[in-house]
Image: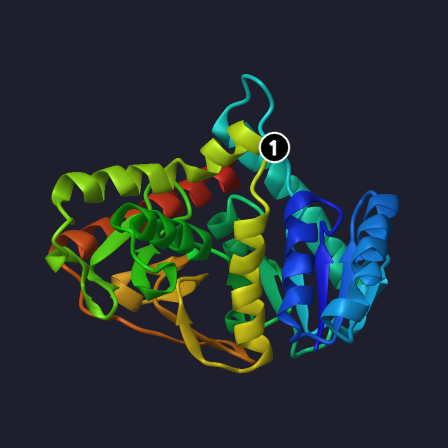
Amino acid sequence: MKVSIIGGGGLVGSCTAFALQAGKIVREIALLDVNAELAAGQALDLLHGSTVLADQVITSGGYEQVRDSDVICITAGLRRKPDESRLDLINRNVTLFLSILEEVEAAGYPEHAIVLVVSNPVDVLTYLAAQKLRLPSSQVIGLGTQLDTIRFRSLIAAELKAAPTQVSALILGEHGDSMVPIYSSATVGGLPLEKHPHWNATLAADLFTRTKGSGAEVIKKKGGAGFAVGVAIQEVIETIALDRQRVLPVSSVQNGCYGIRDVALSVPTAVGRRGVLATYEFELWPKELQSLRKSGQVLRQTIDTVLASRK
């Protein structure tokens, strides 16, 4: 399997490439970036470690790389300027993203290719990519709340002094302010989280607040997230590569799941070699379901606002 990472010179793209290299599953990793020299440097650095990690082809180049790519991962994006509004940032990123899609379309890509959108606002851009690309919408996936979910689990594990891999908890909806924590199915060691002796409503609210602010906290302390988002992306790509058909909280255009339509957001999604294989309506607590539908409404309003502002 070949994976092309657009934005591969940056922090998120390069951390994704390293996570894929360490994972030893994909055969070829190609890095593309507007700064071609930076992408070439990242590829060279990865190549130098290849004899220890995996027998892979690691290259850099232009959009010609996507022509034979099985997964096209788009991580390129812009950061907010001082005093810039959220809508202005969204519009700048939409403009950049649409230009990337035009380059991808012009270069051509296999009909079986999966496009994985990481750039923010990820749900809005996933929706636009599904509208613009000549691919079935099932082959356009956004990272969605995959990153929020692993952050959430890590904070729960640290607070409860539990083994991180034994904590299972989901965040669904928007990758943003309206994201929804799903406590109804959360477990530690296979047992209900709500029954844990050290778990309570105050702790739940605190950890969710910390999860929502995790991205800003990492940016403040080190300039940007890299490692965690890299492994979050790796899990999705390896699920595709190995056709694992695992259920992940990734974003895709919804057509009725939980009563949500015509918007991209995260619901429990079976992912495999053909992209989105199915979405599932697991039973949620009434408050969770209400919040998830509200998240869909928030995203629909954002999409409408963005489209209106670009006319």
In this rendering, the answer to whether 166 lies above or below 182 is: below
Left or right for 282, reference 239: left
Toward the top, the furthest residue is 83
Can you identify the residue that label 1 sits on?
79
Picture residue at 61% right of the left edge, 65% below the top: 115
Number of on-image labels:
1
| Between 150 and 266, the one nearer to me in the picture | 150
Q: Answer yes or no: is residue 206 visible.
A: yes
Report helix, strand or loop for mark 1.
loop
In this rendering, the answer to whether 52 lies above or below 122 is: below
Left or right for 116, reference 27: left
Query: Residue 175: x, y in percent?
Result: 42, 48
Picture residue at 68% right of the left edge, 78% below the top: 111
In this rendering, the answer to whether 118 lies above or below 250 is: above
Left or right for 199, reference 93: left
Give the amino acid at mark 1: Arg
| Between 227 and 244, the one nearer to me in the picture | 227
| Between 295 and 10, the one nearer to me in the picture | 10
In this rendering, the answer to whether 87 lies above or below 281 is: above
Query: Residue 311: x, y in percent?
Result: 57, 37
Query: Residue 46: x, y in percent?
Result: 78, 58
Query: Residue 302: x, y in percent?
Result: 42, 41
